[in-house]
Image: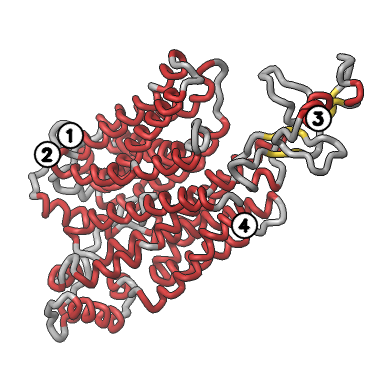
């Protein structure tokens, strides 16, 4: 009897698992907060140089006298706006037409939408404006570092302890970021926030997956993503209600301390306990699960449990001797990078679209629910068709923004809504693809190198996440299509990834390859292995998901 046989005996997804699964997934709501809060706290609103000597100067025009003083003091740029970086060297000569400019050292901001943001508090304008994006990249860099370090901690010290440490650090780093006295300390605390967020997402994923039976494991891996999306929806509401970045940061960080109660609320992974020789603790948890599920376990059931057969691992270098698998691996790495980049990039870019930033962000979050639901069609329609279709849908939608920029009236209200709809369609496709690529990759990689290759795939996803804010904030083109530059980049790279995915084999209902030789023989058109029932295939996939190492615990 193997451990999964016990889970089948007590119920693969019974009442005990349902209750604990929901509790375990709740912190993913907070993960959604922290992952995308930069959309609101790092906004740089419209601004201009402050009038020298006028302490109560505001961005809003206070009257004719104020307007005249501004025009006499601050140059007007070629696009008709007041200068953001310079004032006249001697504003008493403003109307002579023979003046020089010098840089200003204080600014006033439009506070009609946000009363305070990180960018306004630290005056990240003019030459310092380029510091905004690195702060977002630092968070994603923290996610990458946390995936490695906290992943190993989860394997050696336990999933539950790592989960609790991550949630504690999430609360501490988020609170510290709210009180950061200057730019670099804020960036450091955001890095720690991303570091802890990786632990929260990984541990929630693996605890949920290891809690249920093999045939339900794929569903457990998909359902937890709904909680992350719910966090995005709540964040949109919080951002609308709390317009001060410090209070918003505290509002999403302080609840993390409540998760310390999980020490008493959730069990450690029984699978991890057994693997680490803690049989009595594992038996106690399994007996409780059987009792809650109204199932029966033999008195000495653990004595019947044998060690899961360990497949001999193989060096990752061996894939260089398998050109077909090597090519497929490169395609998968590229797809992981692009899917992550576009998913996070479109979320971050919602702040750059016209109209309400809160409504745009809310719609971007809402589209994730039907996207995740559509992923359940992969057993019937196939991985390749659904994945490629979602990528092409998202990519074409983003590229269509070119036609909007060239042919639509930029001042028409409908133009903005068309851009928003195209961006949200792109987000829908990227969300579907993000969920599917994890399952599909695990089925393509052979067992002997699955751990390592999934780890590298996940690393490429985090690299894509680090590229997302750079493209969303920094990529600009000249001319009409300039404002839609990010959508064009996202669209082009997504279409290429979708087309390349056609070169990957269909895995639906097929035996998972065990060796590199078996994976090399799998044909794109004819997988070659015997057909499995849906349940058999889900069980095989469930076993492979359980075997993945710490770096691969979460698709995000």
Quick one: label 2, few (<14), some, or many (20+) residues within 10 Å? Answer: few
- CB of mark 1 within 8 Å of CB of mark 2? yes
What element does badge 1 sit on?
loop
Disc 1 to disc 4, C-alpha distance: 51 Å
Question: Label 3 belongs to which residue?
Answer: 65
Question: Label 4 belongs to which residue?
Answer: 177
Q: Residue at x 28, y 54 (%)?
A: 223
Quick one: label 1, few (<14), some, or many (20+) residues within 10 Å? Answer: some
Quick one: label 4, few (<14), some, or many (20+) residues within 10 Å? Answer: many
Q: Residue at x 81, y 38 (%)?
A: 105
What element does badge 3 sit on?
helix
Nearer to me, 121 or 374: 121
Work out whether 7 lies above or below 45. Answer: below
Work out whether 443 lies above or below 61. Answer: below
4 or 2: mark nearer the eye: 4
Disc 3 to disc 4, C-alpha distance: 40 Å
Report x, y in % for residue 515. 22, 48
Report x, y in % for residue 7. 18, 69
């Amino acid at each position: 009897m193997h451990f999964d046989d016990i889970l089948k005996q007590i119920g693969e997804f019974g009442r005990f698992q349902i209750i604990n699964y929901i509790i375990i997934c709740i912190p993913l709501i907070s993960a959604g907060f922290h992952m995308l809060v930069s959309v609101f706290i790092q906004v740089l609103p419209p601004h201009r140089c402050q009038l020298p000597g006028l302490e109560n100067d505001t961005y809003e025009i206070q009257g004719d006298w104020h307007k005249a003083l501004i025009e006499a003091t601050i140059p007007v740029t070629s696009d008709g706006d007041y200068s953001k970086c310079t004032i006249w060297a001697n504003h008493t000569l403003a109307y002579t037409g023979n003046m020089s400019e010098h840089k200003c050292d204080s600014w006033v901001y439009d506070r009609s939408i946000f009363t305070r943001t990180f960018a306004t508090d630290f005056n990240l304008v003019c030459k310092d404006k380029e510091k905004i994006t690195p702060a977002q990249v630092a968070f994603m860099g923290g996610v990458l570092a946390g995936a490695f370090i906290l992943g190993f901690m989860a394997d050696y010290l336990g999933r539950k302890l790592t989960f609790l440490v991550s949630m504690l650090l999430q609360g501490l780093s988020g609170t510290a970021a709210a009180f950061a006295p200057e730019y670099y300390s804020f960036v450091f605390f955001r890095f720690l926030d991303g570091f802890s967020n990786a632990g929260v997402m990984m541990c929630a994923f693996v605890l949920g997956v290891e809690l249920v039976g093999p045939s339900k494991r794929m569903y457990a891996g998909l359902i937890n993503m709904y909680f992350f999306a719910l966090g995005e929806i709540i964040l949109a509401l919080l951002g609308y209600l709390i317009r001060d970045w410090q209070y918003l940061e505290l509002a999403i960080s302080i609840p993390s301390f409540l998760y310390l109660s999980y020490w008493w609320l959730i069990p450690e992974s029984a699978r991890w306990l057994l693997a680490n020789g803690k049989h009595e603790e594992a038996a106690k948890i399994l007996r409780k699960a059987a009792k809650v599920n109204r199932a029966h376990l033999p008195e000495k059931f653990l004595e019947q449990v044998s060690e899961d057969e360990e497949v001999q691992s193989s060096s990752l270098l061996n894939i260089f001797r398998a050109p077909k698998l090597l090519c497929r691996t490169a395609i998968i790495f590229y797809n992981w990078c692009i899917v992550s980049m576009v998913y996070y990039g479109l979320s971050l870019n919602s702040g750059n679209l016209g109209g309400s930033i809160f409504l745009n962000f809310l719609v971007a979050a809402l589209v994730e629910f039907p996207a995740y639901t559509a992923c359940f069609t992969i057993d019937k329609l196939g991985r390749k068709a659904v994945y490629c279709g979602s990528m092409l849908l998202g990519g074409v939608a983003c590229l269509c923004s070119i036609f909007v920029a060239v042919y639509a009236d930029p001042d028409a209200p409908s133009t903005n809504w068309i851009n928003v709809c195209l961006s949200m369609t792109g987000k829908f496709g990227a969300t579907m693809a993000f969920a599917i690529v994890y399952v599909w990759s695990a089925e393509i990689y052979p067992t002997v190198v699955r751990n390592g290759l999934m780890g590298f795939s996940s690393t490429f996803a985090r690299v894509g996440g680090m590229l997302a804010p750079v493209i969303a904030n920094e990529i600009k083109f000249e001319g009409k299509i300039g404002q839609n530059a990010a959508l064009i980049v996202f669209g082009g790279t997504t279409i290429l990834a979708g087309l390349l995915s056609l070169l990957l084999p269909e895995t639906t209902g097929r035996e998972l390859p065990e060796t590199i030789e078996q994976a090399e023989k799998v044909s794109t058109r004819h997988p070659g292995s015997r057909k499995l029932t849906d349940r058999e295939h889900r069980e095989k996939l469930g076993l492979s998901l359980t075997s993945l190492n710490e770096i691969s615990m979460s698709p995000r």
